[in-house]
Amino acid sequence: MNTRADLESAADLPSWAPSPREYDDLALALDGILAEITVVAPPDAVPAAAGVTAVDLTDLEGTPVARLSVRRSAPVGRTVGPADAVSPADAVSPADAVSPADAVSPADAVSPADPAPGPERWALTGPVTPLRPREDGVFRHLHRSPAQVRADLTGGTCAGTVKVAAVPVDGPLDTATLNRLAETTAAYDAVVLLPLVGLGSPRGVSAHTLVRVTAAAAGLLPTRPLVVPVHLAARADADEDAALRLLVASAYGEPVEVADHSDGGDPTTWTDLGRYPAPVADLLRAEHPPAHRRGLVVFFTGLSGSGKSTLARQLHDLVLERGDRTVTMLDGDVVRRMLSAGLGFSRADREANIARIGFVAAEVARHGGVAICAPIAPYAGTRNDVRRMVEAAGGVFVLVHVSTPLAECERRDRKGLYAKARAGLIKEFTGITDPYEVPTDADLALDTSHLSVDTATSAVMDLLTARGFLTAPGRAGSPDQP
Ligand SMILES: Nc1ncnc2c1ncn2[C@@H]1O[C@H](COP(=O)(O)OS(=O)(=O)O)[C@@H](OP(=O)(O)O)[C@H]1O
Ligand SMILES: Nc1ncnc2c1ncn2[C@@H]1O[C@H](COP(=O)(O)OP(=O)(O)O)[C@@H](O)[C@H]1O
């Protein structure tokens, strides 16, 4: 731990709040599992990055939690937007790629709200020292460093005489796996189950549920294993993931692998809860409500005047008439007044606008509600970011492309904006002087020049019902005409 003098002398050090993935790496480094970590920071956060020798890493509130001693630094190429985001291979030069923590994921490298091309960022690599005990983390009270686990298990005596099996766990343990685990670890003095709660590691469950199901499974094993959550974040590369799991497990004991990756861990296909022991299945059932009670985001995208708002409003009414779901409307015009006042129509502003819509929609979905969004959302990358945000919140994302051709939108020109855009009075107008990237991943495409409002909305309702997101028949609970 640093002395007061150290802290005071650090007053001039630059500081930086690491991304969630880097924060996970920091947790591993502070536990002595990773020797070094890499953080990627913009030059304004790390002035004169090439000459910087230390950076204070802060939590999201800006409180310094650790100090990174910079052993190597390298510029990281900047790109225009998420669609072109930096790939891990490009991000850090091979000479610097000493630890798996170096990988820079696209999500970390460029945030959707980032303005277009700017100066380079810096990848700063080195060991870390703690500045204060970490107060956050998934199931913090269960956290133990490898050294603490060793001390706990040996009672401070004869370290090395206790044979510990260390088992990384990234998904719920089913009955067959538990039986295998009981056999494999029978000869050990102690077993430590290590739920991997870092970003992207838990398969098909949230990090908190992974710990809860692992604890439930541990209670069924004769060895009564310790359960110690570890903030290992997933990488894009399976070999790297495997190497890191081994590194983590080796730090806690003798690595024992039991995970079965064959099912892919998709929660929507977990129909066979019978393969899990009852206490685990009960927790999974609670985390994965049936499709018609899961959060749902219906995202309309299309040109101005294509019919997004009209269809969204009708869908809103139809879903509310059923009486079994709550609905939040995030219509383009309304959002621009309430959430995005002050934003214009540059690429960066449009991306920021959609990121805000996505954030709110994902929160609605997290709580099991329905969000209906109707912005133009011209960029595929930004729409994809919203899909990822919603799915990460446990929701379902349905993309509806209102594909009414430009000529028809322009003919309607109900706000007179197309005429102004043609006359050069409005700049960056979608379809005229600004791009619209036609979705290739839409669940439904509706050309309203050929479909009535009722027919188009019914097509959306039918899709939602067919996929189980609304219960059939369509108007359960609503009074019909006799
Ligand atoms: N330059 C330019 N390009 C496109 N649209 C413009 C522009 N300036 C103003 N408007 C009006 O703003 C509405 C689109 O806002 P969105 O928030 O949906 O756009 S975006 O998703 O952020 O691209 C859009 O409303 P809708 O017609 O409901 O789509 C337009 O009325
Ligand atoms: N089948 C249809 N579906 C949706 N809108 C239609 C249809 N036929 C005509 N329209 C008209 O087209 C216009 C679409 O406007 P709006 O819904 O505000 O589009 P957007 O939100 O995409 O800008 C409205 O005036 C609407 O009445």
Image (tube, rainbow, N blue to C red):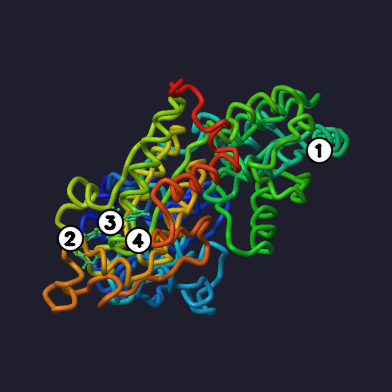
| Pointer 3 or 4: first along the chain | 3
Q: Amino acid at mark 3?
A: Asn
Answer with left or right where residue 147 lies relative to residue 242: left
Q: Residues within 10 Å of mark 3 (few under 14, many from 20)?
A: many
Which residue is disc 2 drawn over?
415
Q: Which mark is residue 177?
A: 1
Measuring from the top left, give residue 213's x and y in whole percent: 65, 30
Q: Tell me the mark number nearer the camera, choosing from 4 and 1.
A: 4
Within the image, what quadrant is residue 424 found in? bottom left
Q: Residue 409's spot in the image, x, y percent?
A: 30, 66
**SS of the residue under disc 4:** loop
Q: Is mark 4 within 8 Å of ligand 1?
A: yes
Mark 4 and mark 1 residues within 8 Å of each other at the beta carbon: no
Q: Which residue is mark 4?
A: 377
Q: Image quadrant of residue 122? A: bottom left
Report the residue at 36% width, 46% height from top.
Answer: 312
Which of the two discs, 4 and 2, sits closer to the camera?
2
Mark 3 vs ligand 1: CB under 8 Å?
Answer: yes
Q: Would the CB of label 2 be found within 8 Å of ligand 1?
A: yes
Circle nearer the viewer, 2 or 3: 2
Tell me which label, 4 or 1, sits earlier in the chain.
Answer: 1
Outermost residue on the front side: it is: 482
Mark 4 is surrounded, within 10 Å at the Cα level, by few (under 14), some (14 to 19) or many (20 or more) other residues, namely many
- In this view, the residue in front, 361 or 98, is 361
Q: Is residue 180 above or below residue 114?
A: above
Nearer the camera: disc 3 or disc 4: 4
* Percent coordinates x, y for residue 96 in the rendering: 50, 75
Q: Is residue 467 left or right of residue 15?
A: right
**Res. 353 mark:** 3
